Amino acid sequence: MDLEQTIMSLIVFGGNAKSDAMLAIDSAKKGDFAQADEQIAQAEQA
């Protein structure tokens, strides 16, 4: 994998993690803490 592909992968994975974290915040605001925990776990794996 060349440098450009590595950089793009980091950007994509970072975006996915942010998206999961934002979904977790939204779920927590709605009181669905079980779903929020799952989404945080997904964000940490990204």
Image: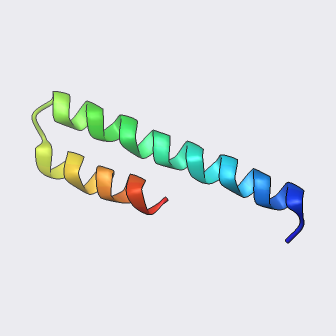
Q: Taking 19 as reference, is 1 left or right? A: right
Q: Look at the picture and state if 45 lies above or below 35.
A: below
Q: Residue at x 31, y 58 (%)?
A: 41
Q: Residue at x 31, y 51 (%)?
A: 39
Looking at the rendered image, the quarter that the N terminus falls into is bottom right
How far across and down, in percent of the image, does residue 31 sit? 10, 34
Q: Taking 27 as reference, is 45 left or right? A: right
How far across and down, in percent of the image, does residue 7 sit? 77, 53
* Numbered disc total: 0
Q: Taking 24 as reference, is 42 left or right? A: right
How far across and down, in percent of the image, does residue 25 sit? 28, 33
Q: Residue at x 83, y 60 (%)?
A: 5
How far across and down, in percent of the image, does residue 43 sit? 40, 52
In the image as oriented, which residue stretches furthest toward the top? 29
In the image as oriented, which residue stretches furthest toward the bottom? 1
Q: Residue at x 25, y 56 (%)?
A: 38
Q: Nearer the viewer, residue 3 or 19?
A: 3
Q: Look at the picture and state if 14 lies above or below 42.
A: above
In the image as oriented, which residue stretches furthest toward the front? 3
